[in-house]
Image (cartoon, helix red, strand yellow):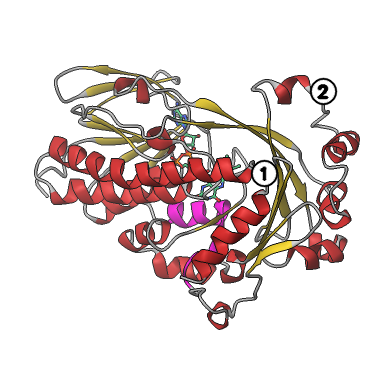
Amino acid sequence: MNHPLKRIAVIGAGPGGLTLARVLQTAGYNPVVYEGEASPNERQQGGTLDLETDSGQKALQIAGLLESFYQICRFEGQSGKIVDKSGKVYHDDTHDDTADEVPGIDHYSRPEIDRTVLRELLLDSLRPDTIQWGYKFMQAIPVSDHQYELHFENGKTDVVDLVVAADGAFSRIRPLVSEATAEYSGISMIELNIMDVANQFPELAAFNGPGSVIALADHKGIIAQLNGDGRIRVYLGFRAERDFLDIVDIPYDEPEKAKPQLLAMFADWADELQKYITSANGAITPRRIYMLPVPHTWESRAGVTLIGDAAHLMSPFAGAGANLAMLDGAELALSIINNDDLDTAVRQYELKMFEYAGAIAAETKTNMELFFSDNAAAKLGELMNSYVNQ
Ligand SMILES: Cc1cc2nc3c(=O)[nH]c(=O)nc-3n(C[C@H](O)[C@H](O)[C@H](O)COP(=O)(O)OP(=O)(O)OC[C@H]3O[C@@H](n4cnc5c(N)ncnc54)[C@H](O)[C@@H]3O)c2cc1C
């Protein structure tokens, strides 16, 4: 560790940036995290994440947080079933937290955690002054071969030896190393929320079980996940032109009016699946799904690198993005800790990351095609059954 005094700035306090900061800090470094949002509570953090053993959990282990994670994650949340629009089941590993009793399922393989809870775990693990809230990054100006001057919307500046882009899908730092931009994937989603489902909709709660239900047919999907706060978060996914969500004239901010239009899109789907729409009693959010080219690589450049969605934005159809962002954070930190030279550390991290992230980005792209293909439920069910039988 010959460069702990080098100034390392991380832009973005998502899972990637926070994991990087945590691992560096535990090794004696003093990274600063600049986050555009004004406080940790400015925005709802979204749904639940399955953390994989070889990525999200590996990162938490490197960060010294795996045992704390096991105290707060939901082992039962990793279970789920895959059905078609009639409700016919193609895969079912619904189980409670006795996963070891289900052949082929490792109890620790993909436990689930709400994003808010994961973020709290990471935030609480950092020294209080690590994150500078309300610092929206605007631009980085090279001031030497190895240093950048960072400019923020609030007028503040900072000269750093390494700036790490952990600023997500539409990274403002990415153009320093790559011409690639996040492109619309062809898939749009509408997110629904069913609050307090166990009490308000016990039948739906029983149908959904403790994890997720993926219903696929006719190049569309209803993807539902029980969250730790007792809600079911539902994603209605479909192929659509880029501007469909804007021109379709669904009143997203008036759920009762929006629901009949959404129901019409799934008119011939089974009653128990339509209940995911009719029971929605929370916010409705339209989402376009974007992705970077697969693979996405760049020529290493001194003083700057990318992690997480900034490096390899992909669709959510393998549940990998946050897992990889955390792994990137941990791998970059380890490379910095284990190399005397910062530029070498960055290069080594990038080469390793290009390989593992490239493979998963390709798999995710294949999954996305599969989710919205003919006979998708049967194909995805077969794929999931093959994993269980391995
Ligand atoms: C619908 C959906 C479902 C998903 N489900 C899963 C799943 O089940 N499992 C999984 O692993 N992944 C999932 N993902 C992907 C996952 O959300 C992302 O891959 C992950 O959040 C990326 O982490 P990150 O740290 O790279 O970036 P982000 O989480 O996007 O964090 C970026 C941070 O940077 C900040 N920021 C942005 N711009 C600036 C700026 N200019 N200045 C300062 N700060 C800035 C933002 O405020 C934010 O805090 C899903 C994504 C979507 C859209």
**Horizontal side of residue 89 vs 306, given as left or right:** right
Which residue is at 21% across, 30% downward?
300
**Horizontal and vertical percent position of residue 190:** 72, 37
Name the outermost residue toward the bottom: 101
The residue closer to the viewer here, 282 or 43, is: 282
How far apart, in angstroms, are the residues tagged by discs 1 and 2? Answer: 28 Å
**Horizontal side of residue 44 vs 144, given as left or right:** right
Tag of residue 249: 2
Which amino acid type is shown beneath numbered disc 2?
A: Asp
The residue closer to the viewer here, 48 or 102, is: 102
Q: Is residue 252 above or below residue 139?
A: below
Q: Is residue 140 above or below residue 381?
A: above
- The image quadrant that residue 94 belongs to is bottom right
**Horizontal and vertical percent position of residue 254:** 85, 33
Q: Are marks 1 and 2 in contact (CB under 8 Å)?
A: no
Task: Inspect this view and state whether residue 129 appears.
Answer: no
Which amino acid type is shown beneath numbered disc 1?
A: Asp
Which residue is at 85% across, 50% downward?
274
Of pointers 1 and 2, the one earlier in the residue sequence: 2
Which residue is at 50% across, 43% downward?
366
Q: Is residue 2 above or below residue 106?
A: above
Q: Disc 2 on helix, strand or loop?
A: loop
Q: Is residue 287 above or below residue 72?
A: above
Location of mark 1 (residue):
374
Instruction: Write the start and end of the magenta stretch as one range.
Output: 108-124
**Horizontal and vertical percent position of residue 38:** 53, 33
The residue closer to the viewer here, 121 or 203, is: 203
